[in-house]
Amino acid sequence: MHGRPLAQWIDLSTGINPHWYPVPENAPNAWHRLPEADPALVDSACAYYGAPAMLPVAGTQAAIQALPRLRAPGRVVVAAPSYAEHAHHWGQHGHQLRQVPYPELDNAVDHCEVLVVCNPNNPTGARIAPEILLAWAEKLAIRGGWLVVDEAFGDTEDAASLGIHTGQAGLIVLRSVGKFFGLAGLRLGFVAAHPALLAKLAAMLGPWTVSGPAQQVALAALRDTPWQQAMRARLQTEGARLRQLLASHGMDSSGCALFQWWPAARAEDFHRHMAARGIWVRLFRHAARGIRLGLPPDEPAWRQLEQALIAWNKENT
């Protein structure tokens, strides 16, 4: 990529925790047996996420692709900007799709059967208060609708999670193991919803959706409370450091503990500038125009990022 070996890049494009969970060695039978669902994994996920019932899936992407197929075609609103896969898949199955800016969602609730939001939002970090989301969920449920809340980046903000409320019909919450635990390659997520809806989703996805090794690794991670507490504190500190670093170079950003969003007027130029210095950031060109930056993995990477920002300001002031 750009004539530079992959190992020489600092990848800040994903927003995934660069300090991943130390994966334990799998038991030999994890590779030998078909991966039947482990009830202990679901119990641990419910305890960790605070939800009454959950379904393990092969990454939340599996649920994002399947949920539009569980409903007859109807009116769907996806908050914009947000993770593009939501709108992409709801638009593929006969639904009347509208993408609505976050400030206009309250007016859109009465004109749809399904509302999809990311909270905190990816890529902007925008948040909607839990009490507002619950009011929307109630309105939608009265007419058989759904509120789908993608909380993939919510592990450092558990007080805002709606997981505890997902026993009620029509509220669906998606959680990702990949972001906070830094284990994107595990391909594991969870869906929290009413048991009847989870049963329909499980039937659609079929058996053996999550590998045995992934189940064993996730079970260890979800039970490791000391690691979780220490990592939350570390990410909050590093997230604040990234925000302050950008601010010190004139970049007014927003985000969460895992990433910052900068609505750069010259986003393409900034992306090229960083790439020329071995730093890969995420460029958004369309509904959200700007740059998303994740956390550097170590002190040399922090220094390299700072030097690149200094050079950007020197060249553009």
Image (tube, rainbow, N blue to C red):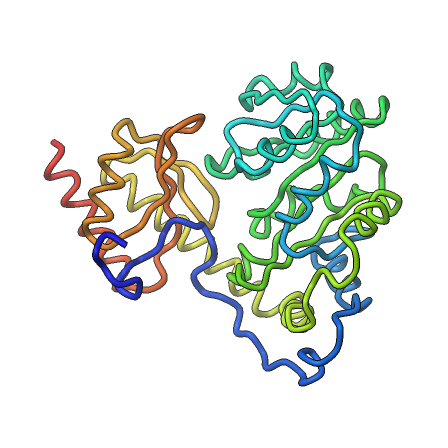
Rendered view: 276 above or below 79 = below
Image position, residue 153 (x, y; %): 55, 47
**Which quarter of the figure has residue 27?**
bottom right
Count of marks overlaid on the render: 0
Question: Relative to the observer, which residue lies in front, 51 or 3?
Answer: 3
Q: Residue at x 66, y 42 (%)?
A: 65
- Quarter occupied by the N terminus: bottom left
Image position, residue 223 (x, y; %): 68, 69
In-image side of 226 versus 216 (left or right): left
Q: Residue at x 85, y 36 (%)?
A: 169
**Which quarter of the figure has residue 23?**
bottom right
Image position, residue 152 (x, y; %): 59, 47
Question: Relative to the observer, which residue lies in front, 274 or 64?
Answer: 64
Rendered view: 22 above or below 70 = below
Q: Residue at x 40, y 55 (%)?
A: 238
In-image side of 199 versus 16 (left or right): right
Rendered view: 193 above or below 44 = above
Question: Relative to the observer, which residue lies in front, 237 or 134?
Answer: 134
Image position, residue 150 (x, y; %): 63, 41
Rendered view: 89 above or below 1 = above
In-image side of 309 versus 52 (left or right): left
- Quarter occupied by the C terminus: top left
Q: Tell which residue pokes out farthest to the bottom in this image.
A: 28
Q: Residue at x 66, y 57 (%)?
A: 58
